[in-house]
Amino acid sequence: MILNAFNLEGKVALITGCNTGLGQGMALGLAQAGCDIIGVNRSGPDDTQAQVEALGRRFYSIDADLTDTGCVTRVVEEAVQAFGRLDILVNNAGIIRRADAIEFSEQDWDDVMNINSKTVFFLSQAVARQFIHQGQGGKIINIASMLSFQGGIRVPSYTASKSAVMGLTRLMANEWAKHNINVNAIAPGYMATNNTEQLRSDEERNQEILGRIPAGRWGKPDDMSGPVVFLASSAADYVNGYTLAVDGGWLAR
Ligand code: NAP
């Protein structure tokens, strides 16, 4: 039956940055679909752990600052030690820095590129090695952005990093499909989280953005649940290298 293909019972999902925002929404969606969750956070899991456990799933917390790829090997080793295997990786943790391009600093370039692109690649590489070792394939889901498709304004390193995420998603899919590894991305539209607090509190920008979203509202963390469960499940086995917009229709305008 088709609905069984969406069932993730017994799968282990590692999610970066799941203490809040979209990461928390996806952790809860995956847990509802049956996953045990390994949360990788720099500041503890907050209430995500309690919410996952209330759904009857296990949650294991790993502390790591993903600005630096030095933690990647330890994160994967600790995850495998905790729950014995890995089936799904969601590369969600990310940051944004806003300043006019004409005066954008090298620090704001490096900080954003390191976590949003470099760590995404090297954590994916380490998890893909584990998937290959296990011999049963796996699913990698990267979090892209509207700025994987568009230029944006005042966010040069964010645009560069999220454009890189869409390209790397394709590259990793091309190389690892032969190991039954699917690598896809979700490009969220304008979602109400800490990441967009500055935009939402600027009434003029808020109205400009809302006026362009066909759905007429900002997205919510739980708008990510269905898409992430689909891409993590065997229902999406023949979907590979694709970036799925979850944007209330923004890109259709
Ligand atoms: P958020 O609420 O700011 O959450 C970002 C998450 O990343 C938090 O858990 C944060 O942890 C974690 N993180 C940041 N730097 C980290 C580091 N160095 N090491 C480990 N974890 C780190 O933002 P969000 O909107 O949910 O963003 C989640 C993802 O979606 C990001 O990749 C973002 O670029 C992307 N996205 C968001 C939107 C949107 O409209 N909100 C649109 C497109 C794409 P702390 O709480 O410890 O900082």
Image: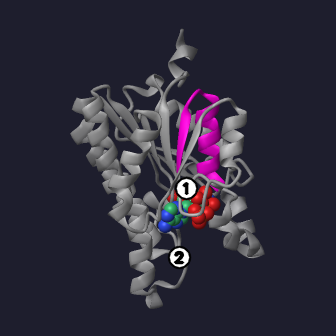
Q: State the mark number for residue 97.
A: 2
The secondary structure that most of the magenta stretch takes on is helix
Front residue of 185/7: it is 7
Asked if residue 131 is among those painted magenta in the image, a careful observer would answer no
Q: Residue furthest bottom?
A: 103
- Please report whichever mark, 2 or 1, sits nearer to the chain's N-terminal start: 1
* Residue at point 48%, 27% (across, down): 233
Q: Is mark 1 within 8 Å of ligand 1?
A: yes
Q: Residue 96, image x and y in percent?
A: 53, 70
Q: Is residue 136 left or right of residue 3?
A: left
Asked if residue 32 is among those painted magenta in the image, a careful observer would answer yes
- Note whether 114 is above or below 186 in the view shown: below
Residue to which mark 1 is pinned:
17
User: In the image, which residues are magenta?
Assistant: 21-39
- Note whether 236 is above or below 51 in the view shown: above
Q: Secondary structure at mark 2?
A: loop
Q: Residue 54, image x and y in percent?
A: 73, 35
Q: Residue furthest top?
A: 1
Q: Is residue 122 visible?
A: yes
